[in-house]
Amino acid sequence: MIKRPRRLRKNEIIRSLVREYKVCVDDLVYPLFIKDGYKLKEEIDSMPGIFRYSIDTAIEEIKEARSYGIKSFILFGVPEEKNLECALSGIIPKALRQIKREIEDIVLIADVCMCGYTKEGHCGIVKDGVILNDESLTVLADIALSYAEAGADIVAPSDMMDGRVYEIRKKLDEHKFTDTLIMSYSVKYASSFYGPFRDAAHSAPAFGDRKTYQMDYANKREALMEIELDIEEGADIVMVKPALSYLDIIHLAKEKFNLPVAAYNVSGEYSMVKAASKMGWINEKDIVMEILTSMKRAGADIIITYHAKDVARWITCQ
Ligand code: PBG
């Protein structure tokens, strides 16, 4: 035998020399849920280890994660009241200002959406049971601007309205926020994997579902179109969400376009791992590393994951 692939697997040092894809702490974004109040740290039932924080405890959490090397965070607001004023000037702008004041050398990403801020729980303006596209764009752009003014380094529209990246870029530029990045949830599928997040953010739709704006999970070509449009409209980073059942889409995004690709390892993916590891059926650390490495292998440059803090404690680069 001349060729023996097993020679390259002989021991861990050789394996790590020839390893093709590695997860690094630098790739990770840690999501945080933030609500009004003081000294709050409420665990989310369906997401063990993930909490709703008030701003003060969020700052402690960010400092701790920062000490393990995590430098990027995405913030989701859990507002006191369900109205759009809370999106424009409520918990998230407040949190961005205070966190930026207290902690240097981090990147803050703000999720831009309406579902947590309206009683209908939809990602756009609703009239007579219909989610209105064009009427939602100005509001989304206003929310993005208020986050940029409060110190967000990156705004991340997750609403899936058509044309929102263009409207947000235009508004940011008009107000001289030319350096604020847009990470677009370009390919966001209507997925049952978001269930635990909706418990965490109290953002489940009050009627119907999100299928008129989030994508049908049976579709692939449509993902290319969504990414193409977002790039034309000015996105700096494109996202595929969820990640684990959509590795083919991540791969496609990476192959076809010249932009960084983010993969969102969503709440349901997290909860499944947590539940099975609690039952003792899987090894949590091994499974998490395998899952995240598969996302890198598929083509993700960035991984948004609730496992971020654990991973940062386990590795620097695996
Ligand atoms: C808001 C938003 C959602 C998630 C991120 N931003 C929920 C949804 O669209 O229903 C899901 C994230 C997760 O499940 O971890 N639109």
Image (spheres, rainbow, N blue to C red):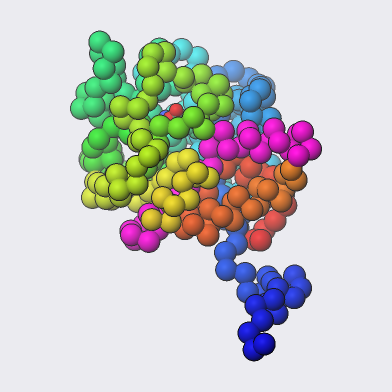
Q: Is residue 213 visible?
A: yes
Task: Count up the numbered dots.
Answer: 0
Residue 245 or 303: which is nearer the viewer? 245
Q: Give percent across and percent down for residue 213.
A: 31, 30
269 in the magenta segment: yes
Q: Is residue 212 left or right of residue 198?
A: left
- The residue segment tinted magenta is 253-281
Q: Tell me which residue sits at (59%, 56%) in the image.
A: 293
Residue projecting furthest to the bottom? 2
Q: Is residue 211 left or right of residue 171?
A: right
Q: Tell me which residue sits at (34%, 42%) in the image.
A: 219
Q: Give percent across and percent down for residue 193.
A: 52, 32
Which quadrant of the figure contains the C terminus? bottom right
Which quadrant of the figure contains the N terminus? bottom right
Q: Give percent across and percent down for residue 211.
A: 35, 27
Q: Tell me which residue sits at (38%, 48%) in the image.
A: 238
Residue projecting furthest to the right? 280
Residue projecting furthest to the left? 134
Q: Is residue 56 visible?
A: no
Q: Tell me which residue sits at (53%, 45%) in the image.
A: 244
105 in the magenta segment: no
Q: Give percent across and percent down for residue 220.
A: 35, 46
**Vertically, is 207 above or below 258?**
above
Q: Is residue 118 left or right of residue 315?
A: left
Quadrant for residue 273, please give it: top right
